[in-house]
Image (cartoon, helix red, strand yellow):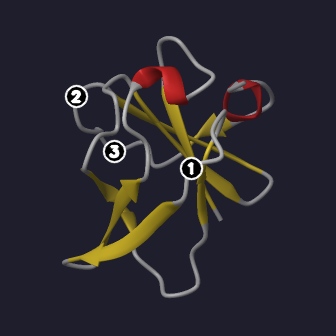
Amino acid sequence: TNGEAIYESEVYNKKSASEGVYYTTRDGHIYAITEKFPSKETLFPEIEYKDDLKVSLLGSNADVEIFNRDGRVGLRADICAPEDVDSEHLYVFKIS
């Protein structure tokens, strides 16, 4: 499910990330990988917000809303429980 964020990817932004959050990049996409279930709002302060960004949650058909939080990326995923995502341990947002 999350292979595209791992295999043949590179570390994105070598600055320190929030605890439990990792970033990779591949083919022009940024992958925000989080250990926490993405309920309500999830903020990714290491990623600069741009109006034309698109986002999806790997392993899920849920709608994901992207918003600007002080110039940084914030996300709201329309999922209720971990069972709604085809991943057991990590949740990966693909940002393009």
**Residue found at the very far bottom of the displayed protein:** 51
Taking the spot 54% from the left edge, 58% from the top edge, the residue there is 63
* SS at badge 1: loop
Q: Please indicate whether residue 85 sits to the left or right of residue 78 in the image.
A: right
Which residue is more in the foreground, 62 or 5?
62
Mark 3–mark 1 Cα distance, whole angstroms, equals: 30 Å
Residue located beneath label 1 in the image: 62
Q: Quadrant of the C terminus?
A: bottom right
Which of pointers 3 and 1 indicates the residue nearer the eye? 1
Percent position of residue 20, x then y: 29, 25
Amino acid type at circle 1 is: Ala
Q: Is residue 34 left or right of residue 54?
A: left
Amino acid under disc 3: Lys
Quarter-wise, where is residue 16 in the image? Answer: top left
SS under mark 2: loop
Q: Which residue is mark 2?
A: 19
Q: Residues within 10 Å of mark 2 (few under 14, many from 20)?
A: few
Compared with 18, 56 (above or below) is below
Which residue is farthest top? 88
The amino acid beneath tag 2 is Glu
